[in-house]
Amino acid sequence: MTKSNGMTADQPSSISINSFLRDIRSPMNAKPLILMVDDKPMNLLSLSAAIQDDEFGIVQAGSGNEALGLVLDHDFALILLDVQMPGMDGFETAELIRSNARTRHIPIIFISAVSQEETHLFKGYDKGAVDYLFKPVNVFILKSKIRVFLELYREKKEKEILYRNLENALSEAEQKSRIIHDQNVLLKDLSVKDGLTGLYNHRHMIAVMETEFNRALRYKTDLSCLLMDIDYFKSVNDTLGHPFGDFVLKHFAEHLKDHVRDSDFVFRYGGEEFLVLLPQTDLSGAVAMAEKFRKAMENVQFKEGNVQTAVTVSIGVASLYTHHPSGYSAMISFADQALFTAKAEGRNRSHVYKESDEPAPIAEMPQDQRVHFIKDNITAVLTKTKKASVSSLELLVRDLGNSLTERRSLLLKEYITMMGYHMNLPPQVVETFKLAATIHDCFQSLIGCGEQKNQSGEDKRQMPFLMAELTEKFDFFADEREVLLAHHEHYDGSGYPLGLEKDQIPMGARIFAIAEAFVCLCMEGGEGVATFDAPVLSLAQQAGSIFDPVLVSLFLKALKTCEPNKISDQTMDEAKQIIATRLVTAGPEY
């Protein structure tokens, strides 16, 4: 074996050996290793040269201690061990190798020049030798023995690989089995649970209701049912958005689960309605549970980011041994009629089913209940009509294929919403501003004035009047019309069409103007911008002249909170300094 640099003839280098081992045991050059131990370097060199073969690598050690260190760090197919060595002889070295569980499997061939007496041979075999050769070594015999042990080593390694592959296959099979089991559990959950709230779904409710109803009849135990509805939930979706509405539903369900026993069942009945089934619970227990939960919900704030709201709940109660329903569906029907009465009486209350709970004609309702009923229905009709009208306008614009206008409109509403929440404006007010923005973009696109740079000055000044005239066709757009008419007015009075200034300009129009200008600055050329630095500075420079400086300051603060990575701190500081000079003369308004 050729020694690597650094190994002298007198003392084999452990550093060189380790380097050699790393090379020879690499995946590209994996060979069995033979450890040759002798205190005389010349013996190592001559024997290595005599037996060297491409099928195996040879590692040399000059002492028993060095050999012990190597066998602990590496796997050898065979050890050729000299018996006579100073310090620790071959017998002691072999005994220590055999005493370690990690190294006892390595076959050892003693090489000795001392004695061929049987007692000496027996001592070698007693210390763990598998064979005994005497110097001078017959190279032909040694090579034959090496081939035998290399073959045994390869067979052992093949068995280890086979065993390891078998273990891996078993592990993979177990893992796949677990995955299949987990998937089956997931599929079962998906089949019986609501994806949003995690509660049991309506389909599973039918199966459970039937089982529990029959169980209660068989064992003569009571069974109660609570059907509940989140009050005015539609307004939550309409004013705060459906994603936040989903947030409310999810956390409402969590609160509901916290208020029931482990033996109770909670279902999402549909939309914002939930059903709770209370086995072995009489009417008084059901009412107590309903009232406890209803009162708890009065103190809950649903908050996500800058958006928050509170909701109340109306609950209808029905019980098996009080109301004697003919089946589980009749029990649900009784609870549903009780829920209707709870809502008709003003909501945020629980009501126990009575036969008189059939909805009364409007003419027979008490006056306060009648007024409340009519207001609710008229508001709902007008809201639906208004939204349907705006949706029709959006559909007309979509048919024109102007994706840029649609994207611009979405951004505009997003920034108006952002401003509204940071100013703590009522959701209904924010919704009015957003509707005005939608109407503005739809009318502008439909009229064919999306590119205002092609319009004459007189045409531009007529646009607010034209939009106001168009919205007069829908009398319920009065609030939005005010925004549309004044959104081109300037804070310093230089705008149009009426020359309004400062707080003469409706707040909605001032907010709209800032949001619209910012969107236009970001979408110049039809593409969005990577950073907001340039639009922010442009907006700040127009504060106090075109835009309300107080509102610009609030807008930029909200924007930095929502999009911190798109505005550099340096730009924000510069914008603040510009706006500060305008605020001196603006005066406090809010």
Image (tube, grey):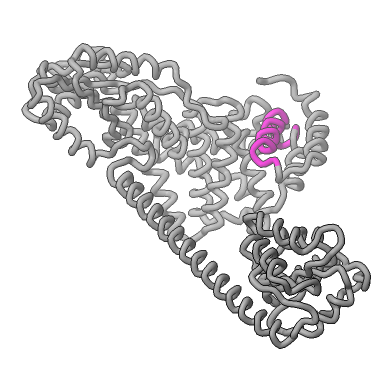
Placement of 195 over or under 240, stated as above or below: below
Q: Position of residue 56 (x, y in %)?
A: 70, 79
Q: Dividing the picture into quarters, in which one does residue 230 lie?
A: top left
Is residue 65 placed above or below 426 in the rendered structure? below
Q: Is residue 385 above or below residue 91?
A: above
Residue situated furthest bottom in the rendering: 140
The prevailing secondary structure element of the residues shown in magenta is helix
Which residue is more in the foreground, 402 or 129? 129
Residue 59: in sight, yes or no? no
Is 495 contained in the magenta span? Answer: no
Q: Is residue 129 left or right of residue 582?
A: left
Of the pair 394 and 87, the residue shown nearer to us: 87
In the rendered image, the vertical position of residue 430 relative to residue 165, given as above or below: above
Q: Report the residue at 14% width, 16% height from top.
A: 364
Residue at horizontal 54%, vertical 67%?
Answer: 160
- Viewer-side residue, 225 vs 366: 225
Tell me how many marks there are.
0
Left or right placement of residue 436 versus residue 7 in this view: left
Picture coordinates of residue 566, whole percent (x, y): 71, 45
Q: Tell me the quarter of the image containing the N terminus.
A: bottom right
| Span highlighted in magenta in the image | 544-564
Residue depicted at 31% across the width and 22% down the height: 261
Location of the C terminus by quadrant is top right
Relative side of 426 to 550, left or right: left
Residue at image x 83%, y 63%?
A: 63
Magenta segment includes 551: yes
Which image quadrant is residue 269 in? Answer: top left
Q: Residue 171 in the image: x percent, y percent? A: 46, 58
Q: Position of residue 282 (x, y in %)?
A: 18, 15
Q: Is residue 85 visible?
A: yes
